[in-house]
Amino acid sequence: MNISSEVLGYIRSQLSVDCPDIDLDCNLWTEGYLDSTAILELILWLESSYNITIQNEELTPENFATLRNIEEFVQRNAASQVGSDTWPART
Amino acid sequence: MPLPDLIAGTAERFAGKTALIYLDQSITFGALYLQSRQVAARLQRLGIGPGARVAILHENALAPVIFFWGVLASGAQVVDVPCLAGVETIDEILAECKPAAIVLSVHQRERLMRTGAKALPGVVLMEAPSTISPGVRSYYSLSEIVASESSDVTLPRVHDSSVALIIYTSGTTGRPKGVMLSHRNLLSNIAAANSRVGLTSDDSILVVVPLHFIHGRMQLLTHTMIGGTMAFSEGFHFPQQVIQELAKYQVTGFSGTPYHFYTLLERTDIASSRLPQLRYVLVTGGAMRPEGLISLSKALPGVEIHVAYGQTEASPRITYLGPLEVLSNPESSGRPLPGVLVQILAEDGSELSPGTVGEVVASGPNIMCGYVSGDEISSQRIDSFGRLHTGDIGSLDHHGHLYLAGRKSDLIKSAGERVFPREVEIVLDMHPAVRESAVLGVPDRILGEKIVACVALKPGEEIDAEALRTHCLKLLPLVRTPREIRFTQSLPKTESGKIDRRGVVAHFNELGSANAA
């Protein structure tokens, strides 16, 4: 399963079940699928699921607005942690 | 004076000044006033006026504000429907207040159509023309109304004691309560609040809260009164972006709940940000801990910190604490606003002397007309003297400062949202595996209180916390869904067999994190 599918699965089960088959480039926040408190839960889940660390300055729409942004961010961060034998945590 | 006089007066004084900014769109007070009259003209043509209600279910943007002023100019009442409410809740609200029309965003319209909302009224108002088959409903777009209606119409003038706004908020029984506020209620409160914060036409504000909260409506009304510009944030999802917006729009003010301020303190570089134009911040919608206020003052040196306490039923402000007292008396929620009387009552209804703890009761021109459900007296929220029983416990000192000490009710304040446990327990208990549940708020550094649940399953049933949370999300928005669920064999009970809520708190802690979701 790819990262965007896993993220959508998490969103649908733990953040907003009213989340239809959304496009990879759909803005999860401005389209009203997620409320503002969801970002804190989402980043905690991403950090634990993909063994990455998300800094405050990285919490931007460029990194987290869409499923594609999130997938690319996770891949970039994982790539910067070469040598880690714990990623990907979810298979 | 009815509320439409606010926008009329401001449009006359500041016709060319920017009233609202959202993304790359903006509108002046003059255009906002004229377009709101065009909306009112269309509503009048549709037979919608005094006595009728128009619901608004729309995320923050320019169009819902134009519709808001248009509905009020028509003499009708605005019903604010929470955008994140589940469709069942929206249906309940619409069935109770029976609006003649509803203003919808594209997203909300798609959501209601997809999930089969039942109680939608026959008239739907949207920003742009609908591209779908209208079915049994009549659709009207703001763009078409502005292109075809005249603003030069005679509109009805309602009495200032009539209802202007209905805001739905959490109710003790689990059903949302429609709080009816009159023109007079709201005007008295915004005038008093403006005088305390010292707002002038030089002020402007960044809005991060939804307009369907009284907190959002208050920002709209106070800034319309003084001719101040409002900029809508893209949302509070990305805290650092909010700091950038404060700088980009060069606003002088920012109003948020403790949740907003704790998040900015922990998740942004607010202390090193350059915000020279920021004059004040207002903390409302919950009490911020003294150490939080101190951190905020260190992060924003030279910026005034104001604190307000209230609730929707009081339009909403009851007390106010100014910047000269916030750091010297941070435990206090302030003194009553002009015209508002605060009393502390004992269980028998007698008034208590300063320093004695009892229920906080407020009276004045800001106290609501009642609930749409009509049970404000039977539910003991309004007494025979017209006083509002807040459900908060506190005391006054000899100078009239209020100190809150707890709650009489089981209310939970999480991320600035008011949540009564019963509404969450009803949803948990609907799951076939659940025998009984108890929901409570536990202290949380960012959220204020975190909603958690203790659940006892029926014999032989199995479900994990994650699946039970998914079940809750089908009926509740995330902010009302338990963040943590712990399972138990049985819940602590009182002698009469009711759930012992104090006992549940201790029991939840005993269950420990090993049981946690």
Image: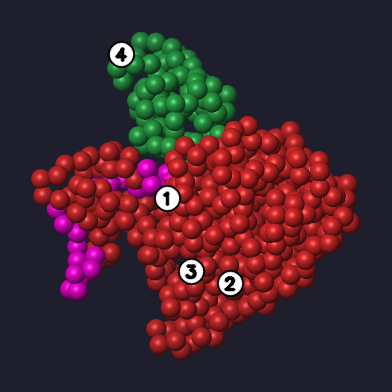
Chain colours: A green, B red
- In-image side of A11 versus A91 (left or right): right
Please state the horizontal and vertical placement of residue B475, each as a whole percent of the image: 38, 47
Secondary structure at badge 1 equals helix
Q: Residue at x 37, y 43 (%)?
A: B474
Amino acid on which disc 2 is placed: Met
Any mark on residue B88, and which?
1
Location of mark 2 (residue): B368
Q: Which quadrant is the N terminus of chain B positioned in?
A: bottom right
Asked if residue B485 is among those painted magenta in the image, a careful observer would answer: yes
Evaluate whether label 1 is on the same chain as label 3: yes
Chain label for disc 3: B
The nearer-to-camera label among 3 and 2 is 3
Any mark on residue A85, and which?
4
Please state the horizontal and vertical placement of residue B459, each as a whole percent of the image: 11, 49
Q: Which residues are magenta?
A: B473-499
Amino acid on which disc 1 is placed: Glu
Q: Main secondary structure of the magenta part?
A: loop
Residue B284 in view of the camera: no
